[in-house]
Amino acid sequence: MAEYELRQDLASLRQTYSAIAAVLEPDALGKRVQELEAQASDPKLWDDQTKAQQVTGELSRVRTKLEKITSLRSAIDDLDVLLDMSVESGDASLETEVQSEITSLRSKLDALEIETLLNGEYDSRGAVVTIRSGAGGDDATDFAEMLMRMYLRFAEKQGIKAQVLDISYAEGAGIKSATFELDAPYAYGNISVESGTHRLVRMSPFNAAGKRQTSFAAVEVVPLVETTDAVDIPDSEIRVDVFRSSGPGGQSVNTTDSAVRITHIPTGIVVSCQNEKSQLQNKVAAMRVLQSRLLEIKRQEEEAKKKQLAGDVKASWGEQMRSYVLAPYQMVKDLRTGYEVNNPDDVFDGEIDGFIQAGIRWRKQQEV
């Protein structure tokens, strides 16, 4: 690639960076970090647990955002120097390195640009994801397990801490349902665009005739509850049942009744957790998921009231938000954004960044 084109690409990176910096305001972020660090160093802060959680949580988010924007500025400056060295020396390997770094930085800037769109009330939270198989028999339960692996692989690649809380295995292949936490800043803001009905079309491996089969799975994403949310659930409104944890096919993996199932009587919401070793730990984890779901219901009710007052009668999320087609051709397409790729294997291996970024932009357009 010619020097002119490389410098054009580098100028484009600087322009994108400037637009992002104008929104994030690094100087203001730096001042906020100093303020929060001063509060966090106060020995009396932890006298008020709620306030301490708020301060430390905000400090972590603001510090992370500041580190991202400052490291990108330094990387662009370094790339400028590397390009000058490449031109002066005529070293082709340096030019290749510049091209590679430009591609990498463009990807990081795109991700940070998306983050500037995540300004919803709960966007900065972690997330609780639940996947349920739908119509389609064994293909649907197998599809649900494929989706669970897809999101866990995505989390692994992004460095997001993931914890599986509960899995209900199907009698044949795959899973009936699964619930897991993604604990990282802005996990909810990103993954929430995955909520909806997912559809798989393929030549069924469970059909002796090898016919094409369509199956469905539902993905639900709610923000991870924090101690400051204070979702009060009276004991009179829940029923707690205990049972033995189990693995695929009902095989026992625990000889004690450590798994916990909590039913919220007013709403009928049922939450199970069998990941932890003790009954108490499972109850705490299950209550956290229940609170997260009740918090989401509250958010949806408030959103519905706002839309009613605004006269907005448009549906926000429809059925079959994404199709995964493996036969007779290969394609994964988001039906809301129009974003599509022709490599389903990569998608199921966690390469869903493009879908998430397109979904966030689409959601922002719907809000506007």
Image: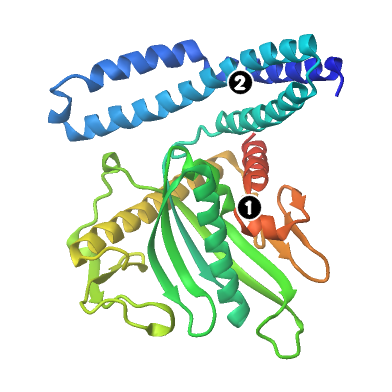
Q: Which colour scheme appears in the figure?
A: rainbow
Q: Amino acid at mark 1?
A: Ala
Tell me the distance, in whole angstroms, between the alpha carbons under discs 1 and 2.
Answer: 31 Å
**Which residue in the rendered view is the most extreme toward the bottom?**
208
**Dividing the image into 4 quarters, which one contains the C terminus?**
top right
Q: Secondary structure at mark 2?
A: helix
Instruction: Point out the frontmost of discs 1 and 2.
Output: 2
At horizontal 47% and vertical 21% (from top left) the residue drawn is 66
Q: Name the spot of residue 77 as percent of width and height, x first.
A: 63, 13
Query: Front-most of 97 and 196?
Result: 97
Q: Which mark is residue 315?
A: 1
The residue singled out by tag 2 in the image is: 20
Q: Determine whether, in the image, residue 266 is placed left or right of residue 214.
A: left
At horizontal 34% and vertical 57% (from top left) the residue drawn is 289
Q: Secondary structure at mark 1?
A: loop
Snapshot quadrant of residue 103: top right
